[in-house]
Image (cartoon, rainbow, N blue to C red):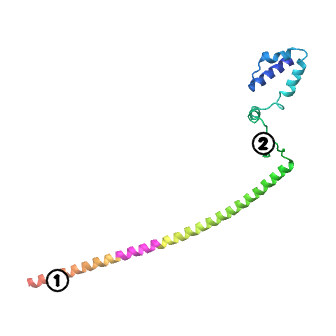
């Protein structure tokens, strides 16, 4: 394959990749004529390789944004391009905001530690309060049981005395 044929194939492949509707018959004539052959071969070699070709994404961007990138500066269509001082100012602003965010993070971390300690103290206090509440409940239950035992003992004592009186009465009648 000659250099011109290789350049023609490369041109056709690039056109096809970018959905440009030019076929072999539309461009081959330029590679066939002696006058245009060196110019078109040189042009393909110079402009249709990776360093100078747009990627598909870049091509899509430039077809959907015909004004190019001049609106990206925020200065409008007649705005000036961003200068080094603009970038330096933006970097300084970002560094300042990063420092402020770091300071806020430290403050939040301190608050988190304080809240954790407070929660731990409340948990300990709640634990001792729960122990006291449980102790009070046990004392109440013991008092209720003591009262029930006393009532049963009194009832038993009354029945026992009644039974003794009945036995004594029966023995006196029998004698």
Return the residue nearer the eye: 114 or 73: 73
Mark sitting earlier along the chain (2/1):
2
Rendering coords of residue 146 (x, y %): 35, 77
Residue denoted by label 2: 71
Based on the displayed image, in which of its 4 quarters is residue 20 positioned? top right
Name above or below for residue 3 compared with residue 136. above
Residue denoted by label 1: 165
Rendering coords of residue 80 (x, y %): 84, 44
Based on the displayed image, in which of its 4 quarters is residue 168 positioned? bottom left
The residue positioned 42% from the left and 73% from the top of the image is: 138
Return the residue nearer the eye: 34 or 65: 65
> Which segment is the magenta one?
133-145
Q: Secondary structure at mark 2?
A: helix
The residue positioned 82% from the left and 53% from the top of the image is: 89
What secondary structure characterizes most of the magenta part? helix
- Compared across the picture, whether 89 is left or right of 130 comes to right
Return the residue nearer the eye: 129 or 159: 129
């Amino acid at each position: 394959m000659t250099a011109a044929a290789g350049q023609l194939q490369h041109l056709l492949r690039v056109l096809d990749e970018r959905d440009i509707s030019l076929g072999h018959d539309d461009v081959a004539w330029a590679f066939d004529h002696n006058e245009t052959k060196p110019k078109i071969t040189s042009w393909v070699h110079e402009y249709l390789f990776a360093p100078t070709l747009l990627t598909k994404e870049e091509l899509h961007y430039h077809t959907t944004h015909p004004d190019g990138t001049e609106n990206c500066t925020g200065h409008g269509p007649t705005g000036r391009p961003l200068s080094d001082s603009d970038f330096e100012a933006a970097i300084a602003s970002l560094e300042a905001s990063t420092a402020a965010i770091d300071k806020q993070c430290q403050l939040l971390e301190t608050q988190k530690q304080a809240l954790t300690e407070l929660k731990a103290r409340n948990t300990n206090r709640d634990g001792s309060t729960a122990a006291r509440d449980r102790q009070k409940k046990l004392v109440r239950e013991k008092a209720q049981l003591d009262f029930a035992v006393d009532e049963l003992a009194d009832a038993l004592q009354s029945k026992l005395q009644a039974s003794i009186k009945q036995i004594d009465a029966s023995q006196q009648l029998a004698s």
